[in-house]
Image: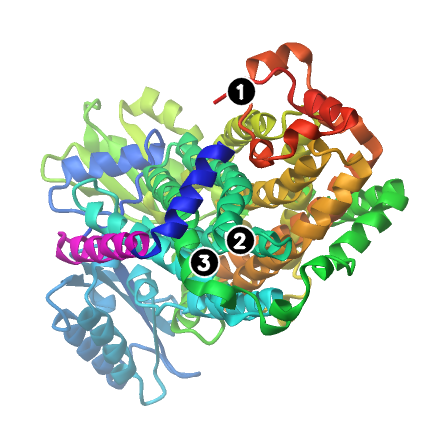
Amino acid sequence: MATFLYRLGRFAFRHRFGVAVAWLVLLVGAGVAASTAAPAVPSSFALPGTEAQRAVDVLKERFPGMDVESASARVVFRAPAGHRVTEPANRGRIEATVAALKESSAQVASVVDPFTAGTVSKDRSTAYAPVAYKVRAVALSEQTKTSLVHTVEKARGGGLSVEVGGSAVQAGDAGSGMEVVGMAIAAVVLVITFRSLVAAGLPLVTALLGVGIGVSVIGALANPLDLGDTTSTLALMLGLAVGVDYAMFIVTRYRTELAEGREREEAAGRAVATAGSAVVFAGLTVVIALAGLSVVGLPVLTKMGLAAAGTVALAVVVALTLLPALLAMAGKRIVGRRARKRPVTRAFAKPTVGARWARFVLRRPLVVMAVSVIGLGALSIPAASLKLGMPDEGAMAVGTTQRKAYDMLSDGFGPGANGPLTVVIDAKGSRDATRAAQKVTSTVRELKGVAAVGPAAFNAAYDTAVVTVVPSTKPGSVQTENLVRTIRASSADLQHVTGARTMVTGLTGMKVDFSKKINGALLPYLGITVGLAFVLLVLVFRSVLVPLKAAVGFLLPIGAALGSLVAVFQWGWLADILGVYQKGPITSTMPILMVGIVFGLAMDYEVFLVTRMREAYTAGQTPHEAIVTGFRHGGRVVSAAAVIMTAVFGSFIASGDQSIKMVGLGLAVAVLLDAFVVRMAIVPAILALLGQAAWWLPKWLRTLLPDIDVEGQRLHPTSGTLTPAAHARQEDAGGDRVRL
């Protein structure tokens, strides 16, 4: 592989303008294709194989024209203290608002008057008007969103409080612009790392170009392949992350080759051959982690994972081809002025911080490993209390209209009013549909945790009914989840008595099933992802213990990150400082997304560090010397990459959305701990303790594995004159080689 990449790097360097123009043509072509393609169909929140989805399918079949996934809103009215919403002045203002909402947009399907629907609290202090739309939340026009907010603002006055919540309002929230903040942080770190504006700019240029092409291709294919309109979200985030990382690693190796006195074209070829080989396999581990999301069985996650995997693969190709072309164009400006004046013989005269740290770890490997493992273990203790669920509007910022509407509904109707359950009664198998519905309704009304049960609403064929059940607890609580399970558990007995099948759905029911499906897929996903990555890393390192350490080691920061989430979001530690407005469960998708994203980045850092160590070891250095060499050349770039990713993810903590805040904190903590504790401390400590045994590979396995030459040993003209000890190490590390 190194030989092929060496030729590729030199080819791109020599044909710099042709390669650059080709990539620009691809970018323009992808952009034109995306702009002229049919718009993407809104992503469907389908949960195949779950009861909630079966109930939704029954509703779509038996109630023509009903779209349970359509956008909705709840406009909540509260009278001033000591007054009622039924007073003439307040009632008149509410009825005028209902009329205005009906006329606010052609996308409005219906608006229910609180006084005719009975959505007025018992003390007459609060009322709410449900608004239904003809389309899903993501398909709402800006005019519809603006009109809703404007109508609500106009209704306020005379002491009447008016707020609005629901999916229609959440869909209208503006983007946070965190990608811009992340790129700005990346630029600063790159300038500090390379001390050259040109060198700092190249990773940003290649990352942006790769993401631009990837996201454009996704947009062009979204409609014909039914990718949905949210598929590119993960691709954008990870494409930028790995695009910067991969380019950084190759640029760093290129500058090292130049410092050792090689000509620019030769340096580019060697950089792509060695660092590029590591980039290829680092990219493959990320692709495996992302493609593995299909194991969950959720169409949305499968499409997001595959699209992001394609974008990461594109980032690898961009780094291997466009980057050497840009290096050729940059000329001597790739290094700072001071570095240009420095003699080649002094390029590595001064020990780096990474080398000094490696020597410190080598002197005290047991202490470093013990402190690191104990520290991560202590941070992981809260994870034992992890509770997964889906947050509701009660977790939003106190000043938002959604949170105010949530609190007003809770005060007036009870917390369960914010997440009613939809019970579907399939009475096709019943002799008397009316009696079956009455039996189900009376049974559910007697269950613990039920605040109210609405009347059964039948379809035209009178074979299916819908009953609204209001829990006495808030939507995201464990008690509400238990109520869903209790209703479902009673379904078999009810069907035996009435002949009708009972199913629970609605937003709360969907969230319960979503969490269950995610939780059930976590272990299989972890096993497949880690297993395939382990096999890949055995090929890269030609060792059993190094890949095993790499694959298992990332579980420590994952546990610590989950522990930090529990401490902050469930227990309330640092809640005021971090802007956490309501304690509650951790979002169900967090563990599996954290495993996928952090595992990919962790393997990137592992490959970047340890391939340089293996290269030094096979070239004749002792195991301890190889560790120091790996940190001398790779410590700085891994540290910079980790700081960039930590800062990018950490910037999302400032979001007012608690789910986004959770993602930002969890990923920032996991990446920070994995890079600086696991890769920088535990990895060298273990390698120091293992010594030469770290590179052990059974003889029978040596003959089976192809030698992909990640270290680029075949590029060294002096490889035939290595010392006997060096030859022995190459043989131990490589064994009988199968030439590719």
Label 2 to label 3: alpha-carbon separation: 12 Å
Against 461, residue 569 (above or below) is below
- Report the residue at 63% width, 33% height from top: 551
In the shown orientation, is residue 692 left or right of residue 192?
Answer: right
Kindly indicate the quadrant of the structure image that contains residue 698: top right
Q: Can you name the residue that lies furthest to the top here?
A: 700
Question: Mark 2 highlights which residue?
Answer: 263
| Residue 539: x %, y % from top left | 57, 26
Determine the CA span between mark 1 and mark 3: 31 Å
Lateral position of residue 171 relative to residue 246, left or right = left
Q: Amino acid at mark 3?
A: Leu
Identity of the amino acid at label 2?
Glu
User: Can you identify the residue that label 3 sits on?
Assistant: 327
Mark 2 lies on a secondary structure that is loop
Alpha carbon of mark 1 to alpha carbon of mark 2: how far? Answer: 31 Å
Q: Secondary structure at mark 3?
A: helix
Mark 3, Cα crowd under 10 Å, few <14 / some 14-19 / many 20+, is: many
Measuring 55% from the left and 27% from the top, which residue is drawn there? 527
Question: Which sits in the foreground, 86 or 673?
Answer: 673
Residue 710 picture quarter:
top right
Q: Is residue 57 magenta?
A: no
* x then y, percent, for residue 385: 67, 44
Q: Which residue is mark 1?
A: 706
Q: Position of residue 87 (x, y in %)?
A: 29, 82
- Label 1 sits on a secondary structure element that is loop
Q: Which residues are magenta?
A: 18-39
Label count reads: 3
Residue at 34%, 83% (x, y): give it: 160
